[in-house]
Amino acid sequence: MTISNDTIADLLAKWEEAWEHGTDIPAAELCAEHPELQEAVERKIDRLKRMSWMVRSDASDSDGEGDGEDTSDPIIGTTLAGRYKIEAFVAEGGFGKVYKATDPELQRPVAVKVARDGTASRQANLLDEARRAAKLRHPGIVPVIDVGSDGDRAFVVSSFIEGPNLAEVIEKDRPSPTEAARIVADIAEALHFAHREGFVHRDIKPENVLLDAERRPLLTDFGLAASFEEVVRRKGLRSGTLAYMSPEQVAGETQLIGPRSDIYALGVVLYEMLTGRLPYQTRTPGALREKVLFRQPIPLLVLNPQVPEHLEGLCLRCLAKLPADRFSTAAELATALQASPPRRLLRFPLRWVWLVLLVVGLFVTELVLGMVLSTGGGQGQSKEEAAHEEGVLVFDGQSRIVTPLERFAPCTLEAWVKPKAYPERDSQFFIGSDIPTKHGMSLGA
Amino acid sequence: MVLTVGRPSLSRAVMDTGCGSAMGHTSELHSLLDEFRRGDADARCRVIECAADRLRKLTRRMLRGYPKVRRWAETDDVLQNALLRLHRSLADLRHETPRQFYALAGLQIRRELLDLAKHFHGVQGIGAKHHSDRCRAAERQPADPLEPETLEAWARFHETVGCLPDQEREVVQLLWYDGLKQPEAAVLGVSLATLKRRWQAARLRLSELLEDWSVE
């Protein structure tokens, strides 16, 4: 084997390792130090892609692709808990496998999610969560119909929605910015409802958004989210779950996980719909973790100049690192998305602009002169403004200092301090949980 | 020795041995092979059933574009005969190392698949009489352009593997036909890096050969 062949083999090995983790390194990047090999490497990468069917897992060796019949999955054709007749495999997610089934009692198709293997306590927790989620009733949320267990496997039954999920739509027929805003606003409204009922989804991603015949989004999988560690263990990078996790989820700051974590994930979904790519693309979970925690995403307008500026602003606000810098509620996000974009200044001929500026200038000058004469030369500068300038630390009442006391304790110490100049109302110290709870203590200023 | 080939009970039996993931648990297989060499009839039967299970999976994959044939194959004597032949050829082994065992198992599986492809595809083959299935196989949008879609193409694929240089063919037999994972394929006695390189070279060569054939 010649030196160049050795180098090509090494480069291909590098490419293949990244490919296994879901990243397709361009040949140009791969051959940055050997540009003369780029063409050959590109050709061979193409060949390896065409032979990728040989490296598929056992699961796909035996899949029933093509005829909708998967005889290798022992659950297909069986009746779960004596009621749900499992007909076909639909998808695989963080929770487990999803099947299409028939409920003979109600005579309608249902989706049955069968949990992965796990400890008895985990299965019990999943069932508890699903039972709680079954109480959620909203037109934008796929209703949970039933939960139960068959043997030692938990399962959750929900309505079967005929239609693609958002991931498929993004891949095949990416929505326009206007439609993307409408879809995310609809999801945000459904989310807000769930948040008010005390739910946090924790796994918002396109695969968990189904679209009905009118392309109206429906959220699914409430209460079935996996932890960061579980996702990493299952190579979640490929399934995409990691990419939608908020910084507080990625950092394991469980006490900070709340409705604003869902708003972050919704921001990632919006980013993907507007640009066709994720905010952070890396080759390893570790690198992704670092980017989610410390880096800023590429501005949307750089990737897609067609994105309206106000939509970019809303999206980036959702993606803020600190939960406090995001929208405070999903309803607030929905309202912002539904609001008309600010009108652009009409383009007047230049001479009209000068004329308008002249008139405004004269008016302002007259106004200022009048005020100076009536107050005796600015001695009435308000104490409020002074307070702003004198303070070494000036808190605006919106920012928070959040100090997690212990990594897994659901408690934080926050200080919301407002300068004296502000009206007294709302000024407070707050000590308590960052997770919605009835407990906490506040000291009014 | 009671053979339960060709019936669902075999799959269950294979699962019970811990070899259900297509020979995925090499360490367990190694201990089984040791017992096999010491003359333990049960161990021998279980090891062979692992190979038989792999043959069944690959057959199903090969026939997935031919649903009628696949259904027949699951109950038909043809697959059972192939499984019996595999059993017989492997049962004659006595003192082989894991490497020799896997090489032979991979070779036998490849030969049986080739025979099955020819059997179903031949002029008198069952698949040949059912054009609806064959049309469907041809109409399917292959996920990968070079993945064989017809039995004729599968037969060509298995033949082409036989034409690879020894080292590359051995890797294909271990990883594709035997279904070993790359780290488990250490039975070859080469480093993982070398194994990956041979596996890569084999697929590149196969892609060229299959492409030449499809152009013809």
Image (cartoon, grey):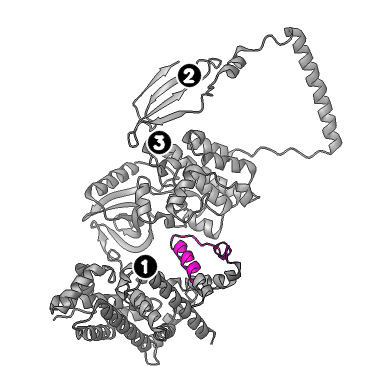
Q: Amino acid at mark 2?
A: Ser
Q: Which mark is residue B28?
A: none
The residue lying toward the viewer, choosing from A431 and B94, is B94
Q: In which quarter of the view is residue B163 placed?
A: bottom left
User: Which chain does the numbered disc 1 sit on?
Assistant: A
Label 3: few (<14), some (14–19) or many (≥20) C-alpha neighbours in 10 Å: many
Mark earlier in primary sequence (3, 1)? 1
Q: Amino acid at mark 3?
A: Leu
Residue B111 percent across, percent down from the top left: 33, 86
Q: In which quarter of the view is residue A239 placed?
A: bottom left
Q: Main structural element of the magenta stretch: helix, strand or loop?
A: helix
Residue B102 percent across, percent down from the top left: 28, 78
- The extreme front residue here reads A3
Q: Secondary structure at mark 3?
A: helix
Alpha-carbon span between mark 2 and mark 1: 59 Å
Q: On the image, numbered disc 2 is attached to which residue?
A: A427
Q: Secondary structure at mark 1?
A: loop
Magenta-highlighted residues: A9-34
Mark earlier in primary sequence (2, 1)? 1
Q: Is residue A245 left or right of residue A175?
A: left
Q: Which mark is residue A57?
A: 1
The answer to whether B53 is drawn above or below residue A77 in the figure is below
The residue lying toward the viewer, choosing from B78 and B32, is B32
Q: Amino acid at mark 1?
A: Ser
Does residue A29 belong to the magenta stretch? yes
Mark earlier in primary sequence (2, 3)? 3
Q: On the image, numbered disc 3 is attached to which residue?
A: A256
Q: Is residue A148 left or right of residue A350?
A: left
